[in-house]
């Protein structure tokens, strides 16, 4: 071990894991630039990292084709009783799961270094922050954790001899025999991958994958699955939400937290630059919000992460210039294509496709190829501090006060551009019944409709019926200080399959209307599904959307909504007696309003 560790729990854990996994050496990370540079050098020497000519200090990585996204089927919430994990999570009893995984962990780090990565989710030392320590045998994980979390020896200092932390054990599950040559992206086969959470003891065990949320354990595993369970116990909220600050021309600030399923444009909205004059948008976070009620009774949010792990395809100067500027240097790219001029490329990037590139699998690619050059879930990693519109208060320990919650998903039909909830319970009903067409962020089929309550289906660390109840309880505590709730759908299409709404910077028009609602400046029209903007209230100055398209965007087809009811009933029935009565009442009222 390169340094002495004074924390008793950490020392014992490192010893236990080393005995089990049998690495060649143990290295304790300090988060320094030297350490980062050293890791990059090792990855370059072994040909795993590919330097990019046009982006200083930036590198491309290619994963194994079997290891390209989160593996929800192999993700477990392991609680003593299955009921605690609930119907939306895979479950196995802790002793059973641990026995299987211990067998896999036995000797799994042979020929490799065990890295100890002390990190803070949230500013180091903030009362809202949580300390985790990831043990991993992947240098790629170390460099990504450097960007996505606060890795520092100050975390160890803060822990002292007896401070507590969340242990996050990770192995790629590919031991090396004596003299065996390593592959470029070692990992275990799919049926040996396990992403396991033990919320009753705040513990994470991940095995077999080196990709994103499966391996960077501060993100989905700690900051959502474990944190959501802690948040319920402790009376706060851990949500799959971006956080942004919108400032109106008079200088008034509004803070918005929005939940959309993976790959539905959270990063784009978080960094959106308004198309309406005088309005300003700044990014606080693009994926996760931790929220607590402050001394004034309002709900305050922090972004526990320190970086962005964004979906690359579709990101361009047109769709998200601020993300493009965040990744000009010091960025990592995974599963993007590599052009002949040593630059990354992906579908949807500005300009023409390159005449020739090497695709994400390492094969020759031309625009005539029948496959994508970049994997649809190809990613960039960059520090949040590199974002030109990062909010000056993004690291404020007490967070920013939330005025507005937005829920939504990707729906090509039925759901209008925007609606406001009648009240908190109705907002929870909208969040709990949110549905979206599936994307490439998870391994599995793309484009199917799935109910994804609060965009938390893959990330809720306990029974989702109890999670709905927690939302209702938080509303009761917040009372008249509760944020207003809205539901949006940027993705509605016309019958001939084209998007009806331009989206991106024009989404500011919808946010402006929400702010005006908060200020009581505009009225609404009441419909069976919620409160819609009155004609003329949505600012469409300079926007080229035809009258017909506009009508279609807001059309409420009662018959189509009626066909949603059985699906909502089926969805709710999964939660049995854990479904709060107040949501059953919401469904009854919805049914009546449609009649
Ligand atoms: C993500 C995801 O990486 O939701 O943020 O998949
Ligand atoms: Mn996400």
Image (cartoon, rainbow, N blue to C red):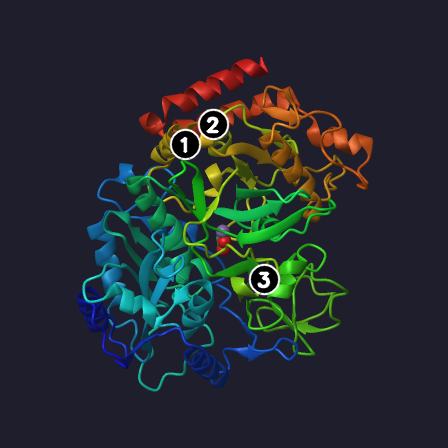
For disc 1, the neighbor class at 10 Å (few under 14, some 14 to 19, many from 20) is some
Does dot 2 land on a helix, a strand or a loop? helix
Q: Is residue 515 above or below residue 194?
A: above
Q: Can residue 12 be seen?
A: yes
Q: Is mark 3 within 8 Å of ligand 1?
A: no
- Across and down, in percent, residue 80 comes to 22, 43
Q: Quadrant of residue 29?
A: bottom left
For disc 2, the neighbor class at 10 Å (few under 14, some 14 to 19, many from 20) is many
Most foreground residue, 181 or 195: 195
Q: Is residue 511 above or below residue 320?
A: above
Taking the spot 45% from the left edge, 78% from the top edge, the residue there is: 33
Does dot 3 land on a helix, a strand or a loop? loop
The residue that disc 2 covers is 424
- Across and down, in percent, residue 341 comes to 69, 79
The residue that disc 1 covers is 478
- Across and down, in percent, residue 254 comes to 57, 42
Q: Is residue 465 above or below residue 161?
A: above
Which mark is on residue 387?
A: 3
State the quadrant of the N terminus.
bottom left
Q: Are marks 1 and 2 in contact (CB under 8 Å)?
A: yes
* Cα–Cα gap, marks 1 and 2: 10 Å
State the quadrant of the C terminus.
top right
Taking the spot 60% from the left edge, 41% from the top edge, the residue there is: 410
Q: N-terminal of the two: label 3 or label 1?
A: 3
Mark 1 vs mark 2: give the one in front.
1
For disc 3, the neighbor class at 10 Å (few under 14, some 14 to 19, many from 20) is many
Q: Are marks 2 and 3 in contact (CB under 8 Å)?
A: no
Q: Quadrant of residue 366?
A: bottom right
Q: Can residue 461 be seen?
A: no
* Cα–Cα gap, marks 2 and 3: 33 Å
Does dot 1 land on a helix, a strand or a loop? helix
* Cα–Cα gap, marks 3 and 1: 32 Å
């Amino acid at each position: 071990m390169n340094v002495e560790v004074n924390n008793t729990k950490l020392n014992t854990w490192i010893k236990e894991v080393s005995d089990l996994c049998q690495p060649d050496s143990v290295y304790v990370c300090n988060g320094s630039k030297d350490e980062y540079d050293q890791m990059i050098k090792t990855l370059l020497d072994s040909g795993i990292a590919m330097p990019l000519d046009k982006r200083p200090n930036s590198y491309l990585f290619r994963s194994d084709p079997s290891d390209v996204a989160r593996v929800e089927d192999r993700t477990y919430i392991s609680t003593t009783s299955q009921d605690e994990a609930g119907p939306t999570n895979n479950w196995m009893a802790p002793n059973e799961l641990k026995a299987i995984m211990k067998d896999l962990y036995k000797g799994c780090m042979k020929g490799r270094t065990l890295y100890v990565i002390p990190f803070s989710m949230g500013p180091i030392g903030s009362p809202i922050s949580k300390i985790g320590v990831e043990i991993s045998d992947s240098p790629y994980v170390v460099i990504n954790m450097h960007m996505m979390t606060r890795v520092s020896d100050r975390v160890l200092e803060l822990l002292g001899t007896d401070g507590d932390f969340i242990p996050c054990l990770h192995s790629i599950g590919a031991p090396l025999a004596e003299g065996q040559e390593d592959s470029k992206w070692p990992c275990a086969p799919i049926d040996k991958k396990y992403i396991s959470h033990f919320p009753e003891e705040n513990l994470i065990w991940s095995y077999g994958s080196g990709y994103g949320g499966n391996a960077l354990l501060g993100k989905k595993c700690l900051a959502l699955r474990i944190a959501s369970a802690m948040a319920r116990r402790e009376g706060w909220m851990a949500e799959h939400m971006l956080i942004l600050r919108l400032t109106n021309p008079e200088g008034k600030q509004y803070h918005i937290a929005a939940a959309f399923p993976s790959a539905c444009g959270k990063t784009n909205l978080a960094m959106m630059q308004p198309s309406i004059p005088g309005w300003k948008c700044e990014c606080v976070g693009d994926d996760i919000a931790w929220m607590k009620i402050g001394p004034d009774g309002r709900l305050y949010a922090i972004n526990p992460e320190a970086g962005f792990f964004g979906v690359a395809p579709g990101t361009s100067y047109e769709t998200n210039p601020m993300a493009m500027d965040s990744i000009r240097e010091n960025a990592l790219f995974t599963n993007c294509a590599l052009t002949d001029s040593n630059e990354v490329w992906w579908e949807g990037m500005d300009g023409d496709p390159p005449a020739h590139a090497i695709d994400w699998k390492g094969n020759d690619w031309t625009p005539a190829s029948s496959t994508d050059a970049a994997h649809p879930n190809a990613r960039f990693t960059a520090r949040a501090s590199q974002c030109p519109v990062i909010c000056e208060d993004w690291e404020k320990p007490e967070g920013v006060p939330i005025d507005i919650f937005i829920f939504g998903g990707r729906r090509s039909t039925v759901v209008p551009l925007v609606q406001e909830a009648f009240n908190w319970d109705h907002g929870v009903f909208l969040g709990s019944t949110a549905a979206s067409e599936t994307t490439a962020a998870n391994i599995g089929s793309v484009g199917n409709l799935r109910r994804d309550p609060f965009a938390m289906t893959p990330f809720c660390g306990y029974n989702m019926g109890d999670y709905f109840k927690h939302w209702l309880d938080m509303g009761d505590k917040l009372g008249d200080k509760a944020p207003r709730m809205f539901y949006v759908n940027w993705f509605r299409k016309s019958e001939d399959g084209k998007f009806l709404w331009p989206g991106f910077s024009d989404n500011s028009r919808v946010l402006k209307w929400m702010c005006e609602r908060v200020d009581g400046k505009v009225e609404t029209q009441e419909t069976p599904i919620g409160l819609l903007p009155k004609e003329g209230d949505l600012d469409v100055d300079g926007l080229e959307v035809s009258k017909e398209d506009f009508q279609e965007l807001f059309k409420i087809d009662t018959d189509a909504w009626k066909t949603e009811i059985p699906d909502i009933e089926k969805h709710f029935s999964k939660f049995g007696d854990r479904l709060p009565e107040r949501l059953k009442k919401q469904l009854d009222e919805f049914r009546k309003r449609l009649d």
